[in-house]
Image (tube, rainbow, N blue to C red):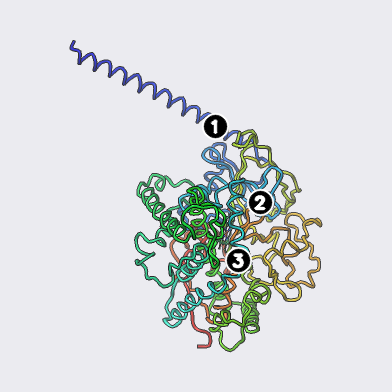
Amino acid sequence: MTALTLVNQDLNSVFWQTAGLLVAVLSVSLLYRAVRQINYTYRVRQRFQDIPCLPRHWLWGHLVNVGQKLSPGINRHPDYGFEEVWNELGQPPAYLVDLATIDRPMLIIMHPSIAEGITQATTDWKYSTPKSDTVRSLTPLVGKHSLVVLDGEEWKTIRKRFNKGFAPTHLNTLTGLIVSKTKIFLDRLKKNAQDGEVFMLKEPASDLTTDVITQVTIEKDFQAQTVPEGQGPKSTFGILTAIRTMSGLVERTGQGFDFWNYINLARFFKSWLYERLYDRAILNEIVSKLPNSKASSDTKPSQDAKAIVHLSLAGLKPTPQVLASTVSSVKTFLFAGQDTTSTLIQWMAYELSKSYPSSPLYSEHYRKVREQLCAEHDFVFGSANPLDVLNKMSSEEFNMDEVLAAKLPYTTAFVKETLRLHPPAGTARLTPMAHDSVANGLAKPMFLDFPAWTHSKTGEHHDAKKVRVDGLRFYNCHYLLQRNPNVWGPDAAIFDPSRFLEQHGHGIGRDEREDETVHVQSNGHTGNQYPQKRDAKELPHPYHISLLPQGSFRVFERGPRTCIGTNLAYMEAKIVLCAIARAFVWVKDGPEGTMTGHNLSWEKRTSRDQEQHWWEKEVWNINNVTSVPCDGMKMKIKLRGS
Ligand code: HEM
């Protein structure tokens, strides 16, 4: 036997020994995981028995019976699937979706008092229940140091840096800028009106919100509204293309595990590439505007610096860590401030379209809503030329801050009512199971108060009770919560801004005002017995916001993690609504324009027969990280009076 053969034999036996060891380690590890998973599934099945839910399969839980309603194959937002389950269960205040074997169980929340329980600060959770781990899918889009994904003190430090930039006092200095950007938006709409063609409102609306958010955060004008597709920031490697591409690549949560997407290498590469391009472009913008690019503690924003990001850097050394968290924050604002506000603008136009006889949903009620809105605009801006509103707003003698804050109550109520029926987001939170060890110690059991409720089909009454919920993911489903007839009354599906008007016809102008109103729940209203209509005669709506349980309107969420961009979004929406309500006749492109195979098959699945629902679902929402109208809100418009 040669020395070479001996060496080969030795290598062979080392190879087989190592391979054997690896197989053994792998098998033990797989076995360990399987046992852990079985144990976990067993514990989940034993727990949460007192939460309403569809029948649970011993192995699959709700993976099949709920999973098929959430399938990405049905081209719709998972909220519609949750709605079907909710109706099947008789509209409880919350219900369980048990995904154990492959994922955590979820609590889908449709009642404000339970939603409050997870979003307000408690002794255990100083800044409210932590965010769900599902938000991690947003990391490439918003960065690791994003307000959206962080929790605890790390989150608080960053939030503090940016609060002042989004405070009304600072935002008021930006009104002129928002108005000037809205002028370009209006010009584009005028052109659409002249062309008379069907167009997707999403395009001009998203370009407007992009221009606004980039200007207010980094004082950079990318001219999204005027740069043609494929050029400058909209070219293949341009920053605006990067933002859109990154949004498109984010994994959609709530619709099951997409295996092909998971192993799609091209997606990984694209995401990796655009993330780098995007980060670098933003960093350059931030650094180029630093008053003193050499790190020094006396770094101050220049006198006229208006960019929120520069305010946030005041007094801070621009160290790599500070810059990294700033890039992340800018990415967060660009993501959070675009689609949400654009979607709001699209639904406002949709609600206006219902007030014209061309809409199958037309009724006297919707016409009166529009007339009241337009009467307010006539009063504030004059009735001579509705297309001149934005010029009026930018004229020196016009006190725009006062107008926005106090003179547009019906406009404010209209915006809120749009957000009630068409919320673009929600919130997902998580608490570990009590005995699971977590980074900051051992999690405690968590309980939530479930209000009493009555089964909507059988009439069976369920008493109020405390329910143990640690180990669950929570989803405050704004879409269902804000349409819940057990909270908002039997006409919850009807668009009616008077729900938000004060008794003398004044809108609840300040966004926090709901907190100051009387809340019936503390006076004994529970579950889906309708609230006692105290003072209802003096109020413009029997289910007025001031009579409802606290937190019934929560489109920007509540508690410490409330949306930082709330005031900015209201400002933009009110300016846009003043510009468009009287200027155009809005016609939603009809069924033939939006009807697709998906829609038909979905309609067959759900047995909806009401005319109203049928039409509403012509523009249902899809899951594009936030909820967005499926057809880009196809519209046809005419100049009013033309
Ligand atoms: C109609 C418009 C908008 C709606 C409906 C909306 C809604 C929300 C909701 C529901 C949350 C809570 C999310 C969660 O808990 O997971 C949130 C958080 C947030 N929003 Fe908005 N938003 C809007 C506009 C904006 C704008 C214009 C900005 C601009 C910067 C913005 C920035 C943020 C940020 C940074 C957070 C995270 C806050 C934190 O955790 O500290 N949003 N928003």
What residue would you read off at disc 1?
Answer: 38
What residue would you read off at disc 3?
Answer: 170
Q: Dot 1, how many residues are within 10 Å of its Cα: few (below 14), some (14-19), or many (20+)? A: some
What residue would you read off at disc 2?
Answer: 119
Callouts 3 and 1 close, C-beta under 8 Å: no
Q: Relative to 309, is 634 above or below?
A: below
Q: Is residue 137 visible?
A: no
Mark 3 and mark 1: Cα distance apart in space: 54 Å
Callout 2: CB less than 8 Å from ligand 1: yes
**Element under disc 1:** helix
Q: In the image, residue 223 lies at what x, y percent?
A: 43, 70
**From the viewer's perspective, is 257 left or right of 109?**
left
**From the viewer's perspective, is 496 left or right of 276?**
right
Residue in the foreground of this view, choosing between 123 and 593 = 123
**Element under disc 3:** helix
**Element under disc 2:** helix
Work out which residue is located at the far left of the displayed protein and give it. 2
Quarter of the rendering containing residue 565: bottom right
Callouts 2 and 1 close, C-beta under 8 Å: no
